[in-house]
Image (cartoon, coloured by chain):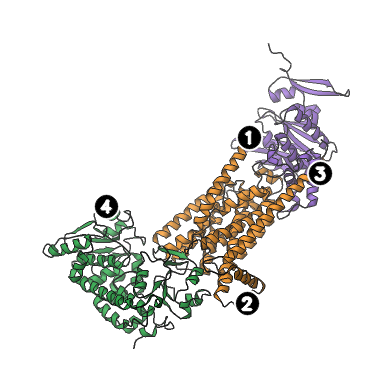
Amino acid sequence: MVSLTRFASRGLLAAALSSLLAHGAAAQEIVFKDQENREIKLAKAAERIVSIVIPMASTVIALDGGTKRLVGMNPTAKSAVLEGILSKIFPETKDIPSDVTAPNFVPNIEALTATNPDLVIQWGGRGTDIVAPITNAGLNAMLILYGTEQLTRDYMTMTSRAIGKPERIKELVEWRDRVQKDIEAKAKAIPEDKKPTTLYIARALTEIATTGTKGSYNAWYMELVGGRNASAELNGTVTINKEQIAQWDPEVIFLNAFEARLNVDWVYNDPILSLTKAARNKRVYKMPLGGYRWDPPNQESPLAWMWTANLTQPDVFKYDLRAEMKTAYKTLYNYDITDADIDGILWIKEQSGSANYAQFKAK
Amino acid sequence: MAALTEDEAAPIVRSHLARQTLVFAALLALFAVAFVVSLCVGRFSVPAGRALELIWLGATDPWRELTTIEERIVLLVRAPRVVLAALAGAGLALSGAALQGVFRNPLVSPDILGISQGAAFGGALGIMLGIWGFPLIAMVFISGIAAVILVGLIACVNGRSETITVILSGLVVSSMFSAVVSLLQFIADPNTSLPAIVYWLMGSFATATWERTLIAAPGLIIGGVLLWMLRFRLNILSLDEAEAQSLGARTNRERWLVFGLIAVIVGSQVAVSGIIGWIGIVIPHASRLLVGHDHRALLPASVVLGAGFMVIIDTLARTATAAEIPLGVITALVGAPIFAMLLRNHYRERNGS
Amino acid sequence: MIGLEDATVRFGSRTIIEALSFSVPAGRTLAVLGPNGRGKTTTLKAMLGFQQLDGGRRVAPDIVGYVPQTGTSNQRYRALDVVVMGRAAHLGIFGQPGPEDFGIARSALDRAGAARFADHYFDRLSGGERQLVLLARAIATGSQVLVLDEPAAALDLHNQERLLALLNTLRQPRDKAIVFTTHDPNHALSSADDALLMMPGGQTPLFGPVAETITPEHLESLYGVPMRVVELAGPSGETHRAVLPAFAGIRAA
């Protein structure tokens, strides 16, 4: 409840949530406001949830501690599930339909209705065209907003209320809060000139894209762990060229986990990128793919921050990531993760040549 | 009806020749300046003097090992990109000029044959399937050519094809392919393939390397040289059907030869740099104003002006901001107003005469 | 030589020309006469090979010097460049005209009396001037056959006279087969050896020497108007024949 009280001071939304908590337990009805300030009424805890939002599919599984409630997801979310560890932990995920929406979030209303969902999680802030079909079909749409850690915690909290497991979110949010505060405290001591410039490559293979700082979750946690976003001058995710990367000359490069065929050799084999400080010091890393891709906000984000922290400021941060992962996977999925699983998630084999990567190897 | 003596006719000829020479000299100078300046500017700061020195070294000793970042930026990033932009601009402008002659219509662009949309389909499908590098280029090229063949199959009735049928068939094939491209965009991954497809559809030389330039060069150069060799024939083909035939042209067959060459040129360009609009229509038009309609002067003028213009546009695209600006955006912003102006002049003059 | 043998052209169920035979050997000039809509143009196209025949065959050399009525004017070419296009058939598809071809083009312009337009833009010339340039182009093909489509239709009387004089100059060496269409029988009398009369009502067209075909009776049935032939004294004493419709010379009341 500590964290919830803290939320209440932050705005209407959280206030609504805490008031719902007060009588929500007595009456079966669940009433709350989503991130577009729409009121949502559920007669009882949602048992059938469709997530049109990509990373929320695996978050629903984590909040529920199983796959029972997730009855539909985005095809792109499903590919992450199939490529990653979730299909091993929960083999039945491969049977969850993904025809409920196009990857671009336009729902297929017939397929969606056929799953008979109590609640449909959809993006807010992207216009009504992707929402109206859901509400017109008489379904409950919960709209969430992308971008910051706070929004992420809020919509995760909201979802756990909706499924009638308010107690479940506490440990997850507390974990996020604890890790964030711990990182913040340690990073505070880092002088500005000891902060390396870091570059997150959002797309590489067909064209090179990266993100500015404003509204970017990746930039947020790179700066959280004591890095400086090399591409801070950009607005949003845009295409750039190699010459621009050479000009920025980042000290650390993080490659996205979205492009399955992308790996660190893309940087090392490139005549220009291989001359950047990051490449010369072997500080190029591909983001891990665990229960979901670690790049965007998701249920495993604290692991992503710790991984980024250990690599960005190896002298400051010495998290035992393997141990953290074991705990986290037990909590999130009630799964005892094996050393081989961890090696796969962290690309131990592929990135063993990278600087500071030996720390992640099994002891 | 006495014939004029040579002396009376000569001054006009000389002034015509002098004018053409002057125009070509100016165009070549413009291109040369654009080319060199483009190599000297970029997001990575290399002093202009150093850049010029590096260009000289690169030109005189191309196999030298490049170790410093400056050398690599100028000779491995900028040089192939500028060369590719020049080749692509030249090819597009040349194709536009030839096509407008063959169609006897100054308002058509190479897109009319369905190449761009066909190629877009190949590109979008390739990106969706996670294909990249050379196989993607091949896929784009083949689907562009396939679109033109499809247009040919639809337009040919009894072994002949009227220009209007070709234009309409091109329209049909284009809309068909663009519908499929939309469908592919609809099902593309919004995190990776969708933005890549969208960006690619707007055209860019951002991914240029010597390798890609060399892949595109043969199609662009061979197609271009053959079109240039056809320059006098294009004059004939630009006449009414009956006139052209009476002068010995097998119009149907020769027109398709021109279409085929254009398909090779545009296909090669699209394969490495996506869809770039407007060049194929604005540049030939501007060239016509400068050197007249005779294809023997129009084609080379379009080549030089197209190359120079494309280099300038691409330099803007890569230097104006830290982010790459899609070429389609700039060519449309620059091209559409120029085209509107040319269009008004064209009809004002026509009504005046 | 140029001509048709047993040529038939149908548009759907309509027969435009049927079993038409005639030939124009080198050295002779044929005038194709008739009001509009009798198949003059179709006959011309058939001769040139632009019109597919439903029967019979066409006899013609590979290249025929064709002078269209107007000529393409949506492209801006210099008159000399238009004329040099006549050399296309000799240059092949990838060929470029050389100094020799330009020489031929200039002398063709000379013969057509259009040399002074050589460096003018074709699309800026008057109708009559364009026709001269197109005639020069036909000459520049080097073909022994010239076919002119209504060469006088757009010309005023002065220019008609000049054109006919020019045709006669071209006829003079008697080395070319020349065909032109016209609706004025006087043009045939002035500049043709033979005439082809496109008779009405599906009758077989009449083909023969001018003296035999251009008669009041034939012309009356050709045009549906009573006609007279009058004889006039020429400037140097010789006799000229002229054709007039019967209404000519009647004073308005």
Host chain of mark 1: C
Q: CA distance from mark 4 to mark 2?
A: 67 Å
Colour in which chain B is drawn: orange
Chain drawn green in the picture: A
Task: Determine the residue located farthest toward the top in the rendered image.
Answer: C253
Foreground pick, C103 / C55: C103
Badge 4 and badge 2 in a common chain: no
Q: Label 4 near label 1: C-beta < 8 Å?
A: no
Looking at the picture, which amino acid does disc 1 mark? Thr
* Residue B185 percent across, percent down from the top left: 42, 59
- Observer-side mark, 3 or 2, equals 2
SS state under label 3: helix
Colour in which chain C is drawn: purple
The residue that disc 3 covers is: C107
Host chain of mark 2: B
Q: CA distance from mark 3 to mark 1?
A: 43 Å
Query: Which of the 4 image quadrants contains residue B85?
Result: bottom right
Task: Determine the residue located farthest toward the left in the rendered image.
Answer: A26
Q: Quadrant of the N terminus of chain A?
A: bottom left
Looking at the picture, which amino acid does disc 2 mark? Arg
Residue shown at the point (74%, 50%) measured from the top left = B17
- Which circle marks residue C15 in the picture? 1
Q: Is residue B208 left or right of residue A14?
A: right
The residue that disc 2 covers is: B64
Badge 3 and badge 4 in a common chain: no
The residue that disc 4 covers is: A136
| Label 3 Cα neighbours within 10 Å, binned few <14 / some 14-19 / many ≥20 | some
* Residue B299 percent across, percent down from the top left: 66, 54
Q: CA distance from mark 3 to mark 4?
A: 82 Å
